[in-house]
Amino acid sequence: MGLEEYKGVYVFAQQVDNVLSNISFELIGEGKRLAKDLDTDVTAVLVGSGVKALADELAAYGADKVIVVDDPELKNYRTEPYAHALASVINEYKPEIFLVGATAIGRDLGPTVSARVATGLTADCTSLEIGDFPINPIPGQEQKHNQLLMTRPAFGGNTIATIACPDNRPQMATVRPGVMQKLDKVEGAKAEVIEFNPGFTPNNRYVEILEVSKAVSDIKDIMDAKILVSGGRGVGSPENFKLLEDLAEAIGGQVSCSRAVVDSGWKPKELQVGQTGKTVRPNVYFAIGISGAIQHVAGMEESDIIIAINKDEDAPIFDVADYGVVGDLNKIVPALTEAIKAEIANK
């Protein structure tokens, strides 16, 4: 493999029903940061049917180029035609780095594509950097420069691993939604649009979609919330979450929770924050009755302000909190709620 042939940072621009997913813009933002270190540009790969009009939106969030693979076979996501599309783009244009969102689609698509183009893939990354590998020089071993260093939780979140793919290209990673920051939107920005179609011939790996049934939920996505009031096992019971709901309503926030709460059946999976839940980045994050295990912290540590309320003064959550209150949440939370209501009433 001639590694010098591979240039540029490419990202998979995921869309569903011709609506771009937020992870697409996050990946472009991260791609621009990586591309700056490599003195290259960022290309978004847009796959679907009738999706060319979305190219301007990708440009508005920073894409320098957009490769559009448009075909009726790509109307709904299916592993085989989408994998064929991305693998063909990689073989044709030879990107140095290829990023995919660690969504339900990306976790299926990324490994399939990496196997097809004979490269490695680091899954569920929480940090990406350009640097040297090995990170620390080893006598007798070449240290390669400008490598993609991909960091992810390992061993159940109990340690952090940094992984590189020095001998194959592209360097591929799936990236957790909500971890990377998208750039500010620039209205009217344009990107070079390249139309590419490798041809699609259905085979025995093409599944047939008989019906699409969409679940209807009135639960707002916690990843979009500016204020989150999150509860853990320490809340004590599902009924006690009423205290958190009252606080969230008073402050204009939204309730979320830890994995222990979901495992206990108190709250639905959609509200879970953490390594096996969602990664959030609100302006304010209340951690109430949450001990602060590394698996939970991985999903909320990038919040602007973290406020912890816990009766255990040695709880690990206080290590990442900006403000901490040690005490009984059954007394503190109602008092805080009333104080906020009174402040609002006086304005």
Image (cartoon, rainbow, N blue to C red):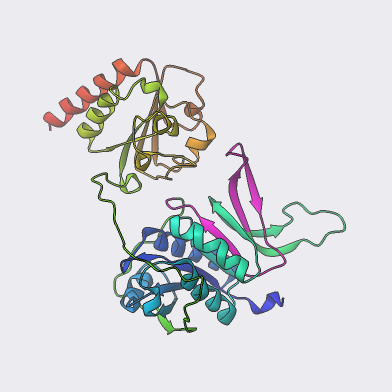
Judge by depth and name the residue closer to the eye, 341 or 117. Answer: 117
Q: Position of residue 159 (x, y in %)?
A: 63, 39
Point 44% across, 42% down: residue: 277
Judge by depth and name the residue closer to the eye, 96 or 267. Answer: 267
Q: Please determine whether, in this image, residue 316 is positioned above or below residue 5.
A: above
Q: Is residue 283 toward the left or the right of residue 121 in the image?
A: left
Q: Quadrant of the C terminus?
A: top left
Q: Position of residue 57 (x, y in %)?
A: 33, 70
Q: Please determine whether, in this image, residue 109 is positioned above or below residue 95.
A: above
Residue 150: in magenta span = yes
Visible in this render: residue 189?
Answer: no
Magenta span = 149-178
Point 51% across, 29% down: residue: 319
Q: Quadrant of the N terminus?
A: bottom right
Residue 321: in magenta span = no
Q: Is residue 241 toward the left or the right of residue 149 in the image?
A: left
Point 61% across, 55% down: residue: 150
